Amino acid sequence: MKRILPSLAIATLCATGLLVAQDPDGQSEPGRAVARISVLNGDVSVRRGDSGDVVAAAINGPIMADDRILTGASSRAEVELDFANAIRIGPSSEVRFSGMDVNSFQIQVAVGTATFRVLRPSQAQSEVDTPSVALHPLRQGIYRVSVREDGTSEITVRSGQADIYSANGSQRLESGQTMNARGSAADTEFQIVQAIPPDSWDRWNEDRDHYLERSQSSKYVSPDVYGAEDLDQYGQWTNDPTYGNVWAPNVAPGWAPYRDGRWVWEDYYGWTWVSYDPWGWAPYHYGRWFWGSGRWCWYPGSIYGHYGWSPALVGFFGYGGGFGGGVGFGFGGVGWVPLAPFEVFHPWWGRGFYGGFRNGGFNNTTIVNNVNVFNSFRNARINGAVTGVNTANFGRQGRFTSLDRGQIQQAGLVHGALPVAPDRASLRMSDRAVSGNFAQSRVQSFATRNQAPRVEHFSFDQQQRAMQQMSRSDFTQSGRTGAGNSSGFARTMPNTGAGVNQSNRGGDPASSGNRGWGRFGQPGNANAAPQSQAPAARSFDNSGASRGWQRFENSAPSGGSSAVHISPPIVQQRSRGDYAPPNYNAPRPNAPSFDSPARNYQQQAPRSYEAPRSYGGGGSPAPRSFGGAPSGGGGGVGGARSSGGNGGGGARSSGGSGGGHSGGGGGGHSGGGGHR
């Protein structure tokens, strides 16, 4: 018998923060950190840390430790790390996510330009590494980092304050200052000058900041929930008598959660939902969905609750005739339904699941046969809420259909890992082709203040074989537990430098003459006034007299200094099957240039874009309205407003600034989402 809480009791618990959207069954405990691709323009790809595959990036695509972002010419991306921290990546750049944990981020800029933004007060310990120095932001601010092909670095603090670390010491960098650094991480010279003049890259970052700062949705969610800024323009917040503040998207009749997107295989988490909805991050990885006042609503949980990221919050089941071949589990189709608030949930990921690859078997999957799905999930009783696909097409683009009552009266509920094996197509966030027009980075090591802990990876081939064996297990008996035989696995470690050569850096500063370069900690350096610097001075001269360069010495900023390590290359041999890596030998300029004030970061002219559909839908009015989808599309693929607007793909001189949008090349969802 189900126990139903009276509406008054639920409302009371919500108001006091004692009730959360997820069940206390372990899934709200923090797992491995996951970041979100929140802005995407032009040719942007992801090199996956688990498999080494390079795949086309997509809005709402997950980024995990040891992944890399690669951008082509005239391309850019933003990755949200949590509710307060983000990194924005400029054209012809490579950024590596070397360490990601709850409240800890370590990022490496191998080549190109990136801006690390601390938008709100945060307890996170963040570090941005270059081949010669490591940057540690001390407060809210804007931190721009550029790395040239010769390994020289340029760090600018637009606002805030940072400590810059080298192997021989550290140096405080204040707002309005730029540091140029050259040499190896073991022997680095630096020069502090006035901040370089703002350019079109900085203006785009400023526009993006304004977009995020205007968001009202963050007031309605826990600080643990990030990616909610995009909810403002795609729906309304309203007060539900049972759950309190909930969000209702502007969607067409017949729409259902977890239908417009794809299932992607992610290391540690397994099957993960990547939504094509431009707002589709927070509502699919946190909270629950329900039908209220004639429309779909998302309940984010109490603003006082603590929540962990989930790859999806659905109930899986099998239906239809048997499907063999090692990719199914005795059913012809896989179905899923969004979970309602407080429904029992059976996680399929985490240490227990991932440990199966190490321990030689899985013991967390149970198939409960001959179940009527309508009696098992509240949302299944909503017309059109249940989605399914042929088992052979699970993990691929589209072909999802709405399932009716007759199709799912005799289903097999899945508790735990879904026994469907991934293939290489399951690694893709999008079906766009990967561009090979990326600059080659030959950097093998970085300066680092705190060495990021190594993340255990099992190769994709190992995971695939284990899931294939698991899918062939006998699940014919009600409640039968499948234990795939996954013995013989070898543990692998992340690849931070496989297949690349030592970077061609500038000459030995000790033998080149000073020219004003100095070591960290030399007397008089910390409080020296910045020198004036024209934009042309950004091209370093590595020979001659001193010119204000200094060496890092054993000085420490206030609060003390931590020893700086040089991260060694970690070479991991991965089995890649028939995967062929793209060509990284495309030419690129010696240094990023953003000096053209009218530069448009779109790679090509914006495509025509159909604005998000106007939907109706009843229900009680929202207590405040944040506007529906803007005319012109609000920054979807090529969404070009005459005023530039807030769209990530908006064509304007500074490139627009929308959230959760893609642009500049590549097919997109008509609702403004990421690429399929």
Image (spheres, rainbow, N blue to C red):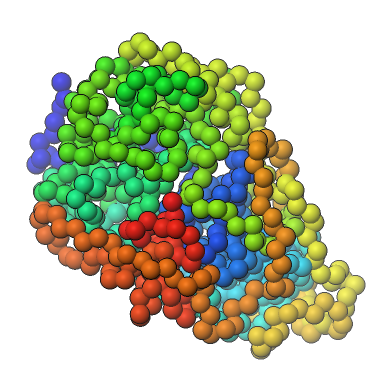
Answer with left or right where residue 581 lies relative to residue 168: left
Q: Which residue is depicted at the point 73% across and 46% down?
A: 498
x then y, percent, for residue 107: 59, 56
Q: Which residue is depicted at the point 45% across and 65% down?
A: 663
Q: Is residue 361 visible?
A: no
x then y, percent, for residue 393: 43, 35
Q: Is residue 474 above or below residue 554?
A: above
The residue positioned farthest toward the right in the image shown: 511
Q: Nearer the viewer, residue 130 or 599?
A: 599
Q: Nearer the viewer, residue 344 or 472?
A: 472
x then y, percent, for residue 351: 49, 31
Answer with left or right where residue 270 lies relative to residue 619: right
Answer with left or right where residue 551 lies relative to residue 561: right
Q: Which residue is depicted at the point 30% across and 65% down?
A: 611
Instruction: Specify the quadrant of the image occupied by residue 185.
Output: bottom right
Circle count:
0
Answer with left or right where residue 182 lies relative to residue 107: right
x then y, percent, for residue 72: 60, 64
Q: Where is the N terminus found, in terms of image quarters?
A: top left
Q: Is residue 457 visible?
A: yes
Q: Is residue 228 above or below residue 388?
A: below
Q: Which residue is depicted at the point 38% across and 73% down?
A: 640
